[in-house]
Amino acid sequence: MRELNFQGQNLQGRTFVNMDLRGANFKDANLVGVDFRGSDLRGVNFQGANLFGSDLENTLLDDVIYDHNTKYYEMYCPSEGAFLAYKKCYNYRIVQLLVPGDAKRTSATRNSCRCDKAKVLSIKSEDSTESFEEATSYVDESFIYKVGEWAIAENFNEDRWVESTTGIHFFMTREEAIGYL
C-alpha cells in the first residue's frame, strides 16, 4: 500500500500491522488505539491526527510529517530539563518525583512516561491526608520508593515507542497518577 488517503477518517482501533504505508495521508484522522507495529510509515502525514494509544513499536518513521495539532506524537513529558512527576504505587500511595535534567526520559503515545532515574520527594495517600516513607511499585514488588532517595531503573529501555518496558513509569500530574488503575 502506498500513498493511501485516510484524511479525516475515523480509524480508531484498526490494525495496520507489518504494512507498507509509505506516504499515506492520515491528516486529521482519528488514529486512537491503531496498531501500526512493524509498519513502514516513512513520509506519512500525521498533521492534526490523534495518535493516542497507537502502537508505533518497530515502525519506520523517517520523514513523518506532523504539526502542533498532532496529538500524542511528540513526547508527553519535557524532552529536557528537570521537572516534577507522579506515580501510583500499592495501597493507593502517590509518589512525587523529581526527574533531573540529566535523566533519560521517554513517552510513546499516551500520557504515561518513563525515565531512568528520579528523586523521591514525597509519598502521600491519594487524598493527601497521610504521608509515608516508602511505597512499593505495582509492576516490580522488589522496587521500593523511599522519601529522599534516588530511584534508579537498571537497563532502561530508550526506545520511546515501546510502551510497557523497563524504566520508572510516571505521569505529569498527580491527577493522572491517581487515575491509573
Image (cartoon, helix red, strand yellow):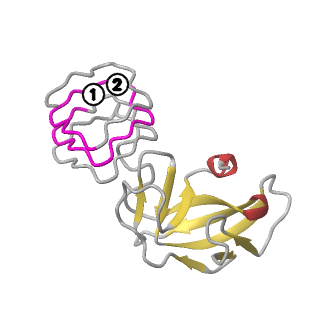
**Rendered position, 177 above or below 48:** below
User: Based on the displayed image, in which of its 4 quarters is residue 150 positioned?
Assistant: bottom right
Q: Does residue 76 show up magenta in the picture? A: no
For residue 143, side relative to residue 10 (left or right)? right
In the rendered image, residue 113, in percent from the top left (x then y), is placed at 49, 56
In the rendered image, residue 60, in percent from the top left (x then y), is placed at 21, 49
Q: Residues within 10 Å of mark 1 (few under 14, many from 20)?
A: many
Q: Does residue 44 show up magenta in the picture? A: yes
In the image, 52 versus 98, the foreground residue is: 52
**Rendered position, 116 above or below 46:** below
In the image, 55 versus 1, the foreground residue is: 1
Residue range of the region highlighted in magenta in the rendering: 18-45
Which residue bears the numbered disc 2?
29
In the rendered image, residue 80, in percent from the top left (x then y), is placed at 38, 61
For residue 81, side relative to residue 20 (left or right)? right
Q: Residue most toward the right?
A: 129
